[in-house]
Image (spheres, rainbow, N blue to C red):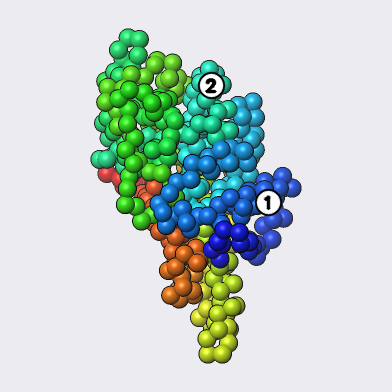
Amino acid sequence: MQTKKGQKDPFESPDFYMIDDLLTEEHKLVRSAMRDFVKLEITPFIEDWCQKNYFPTEIVKKFGEIGAFGPTIPTEYGGGGMDYISYGLIMQEIERGDSGMRSTASVQGSLVMYPIYMFGSEEQKKKYLPRLASGELLGCFGLTEPDHGSNPSGMTTTFKDMGDHYLLNGAKMWISNAPKADIAIVWAKNETGRVYGFIVETDTEGFSTPETHNKWSLRASATGELVFDNVKVPKENQLPEKSGLGAPLMCLDSARYGIAWGTIGAAMDCYDSARRYALERIQFDKPIASFQLIQKKLAEMLTEITKAQLLNWKLGKMMNEGTVTSAQISMAKRNSVETALNIAREARQIHGAMGITGEYPMMRHMMNLESVITYEGTHDIHLLILGKEITGIQAFY
C-alpha cells in the first residue's frame, strides 16, 4: 500500500518456496538494511515526487551512505565488496520503492562505476570511484543516440585525436541521471569506426545536458540528453583497458542483471498491496478475497513471483561464479519485466477504481515498467538474443 509522510510502510515480502534458506546471513542483513532504508526514505515520499515530476537530489548522498552505489566494487575503491546476490537484493528492495530510484542506483553502479573499474586506469579508479560510491558525484552513461537505440553499432558520436586532447562531437538521448550528473561515461567512434569510452565531466565547455520533459513514466528519475559540441576531453580521461562495442555491452549485462532482480521488487509490491486490499475490501457483504477470480489472480501472481525469484537466485550464483552468459541475463531481464507488468495490471484490477490513484502503487509501477521493458534492450530484442542462442541464426538484420 502507498504510504503518506509519517505513515508506516506495511510491506511484507512473499517467500512461498522458502528461498531465504538459499541466502546467507549477510544477504539477509543487506536486504533488511535496504528494506528499512526504502521504508524510511522512499515510500513515504515517492508518490509526491512522481506527481510533481521531481528528482530528489538529496537521495544521492543517502544512497551513498547506505551502500547502494557499486556494491560489488572492491572496498579499496569505496565499493561494498559484496557478491552479486547481495547486489540483486539491493536492486530488488529499491525498485520495490520505485523503478526510477532503482534506475539512479543501477546507472551509478553498473553503468558508471563498473566501466571505470573494469576498463579504467588505476588513476581513474582512485579519482572517481570513491566519490561515486559515496554519492559525492553522480554519473550517467551515454550509449543510446536519437537514431541508434537497439543498433548501438550505428552510433554517430565521434572523437578526433587533436594531439594533446580528444575532440568529441555528437549527441546521446534517453540518458538517466543526465540533467543532474557530474560525469558521463560516453561511447564514441574514432576515424576508423572503433568504439572507445571516455569519462567526460559535465561542466566541460561545449557539453550540455538538456532535460527530457513530459514523461508519463519514471517521473522521479531525471532523464535527459548529452550534447557534445567540440568538447575537449583530456587524453587521460579515455578508458584505456578495453575498446570496441563489447565494452559497453558488458556494462549493459551488469545493468540488465540488476533489472532482473529489481523489477520483481515492483511485482512484490503490487502483489502485497493487492493481497491486503482483497482482504479488506467488502463487496456483496464479504471480502473480495473470498471470490474465486480474485484468488486466481493472487495465486498466479505468487506463482510467477516465486518462479522469478528462483531464476534470479540461480542467475546470481552464475554471476558470482563467472559462468553466466549474456543470453541467460537476457532471459531473466525479459522474464522479470514481463512478470512485473502483468502483476501490476492484475493488481490494479483487484483494486478497482482505487487502483488508478496514488493511494496505491500499481499505476505508478505500471507506468515505470513500460520504460523498463524498453531500456537496457527492448523486450523484443531480448527475445531475439535468445532466438540466436537457440538457433545460431542472427535475426536482427
Judge whether 201 appears above or below 60 on screen. above
Q: Tell me the tag on residue 303.
A: none
Between residue 157 and residue 178, name the one nearer to us: 178
Residue most toward the front?
Answer: 6
Residue with the mark numbered 2: 127
Residue at left offset 50%, top offset 67%: 359
Between residue 358 and residue 168, name the one nearer to us: 358
Which percent across, then down, holds residue 40? Answer: 62, 52
Q: Circle 2 sits in a helix, a strand or a loop, which is it?
A: helix
Amino acid type assigned to the residue bearing label 1 in the image: Ser
The reply to whether callout 1 and callout 2 are in contact (CB within 8 Å) is no
Q: Circle 1 sits in a helix, a strand or a loop, which is it?
A: helix
Q: Tell me the tag on residue 32.
A: 1
Question: How many numbered dots are placed on residues in this image?
Answer: 2
In the picture, the quarter occupied by the N terminus is bottom right
Residue most toward the right?
Answer: 25
Which percent across, then down, holds residue 239? Answer: 44, 22
Between residue 201 and residue 253, name the one nearer to us: 201
Asked if residue 306 lies left or right of residue 229, the reply is right
Which percent across, then down, holds residue 234? Answer: 39, 16
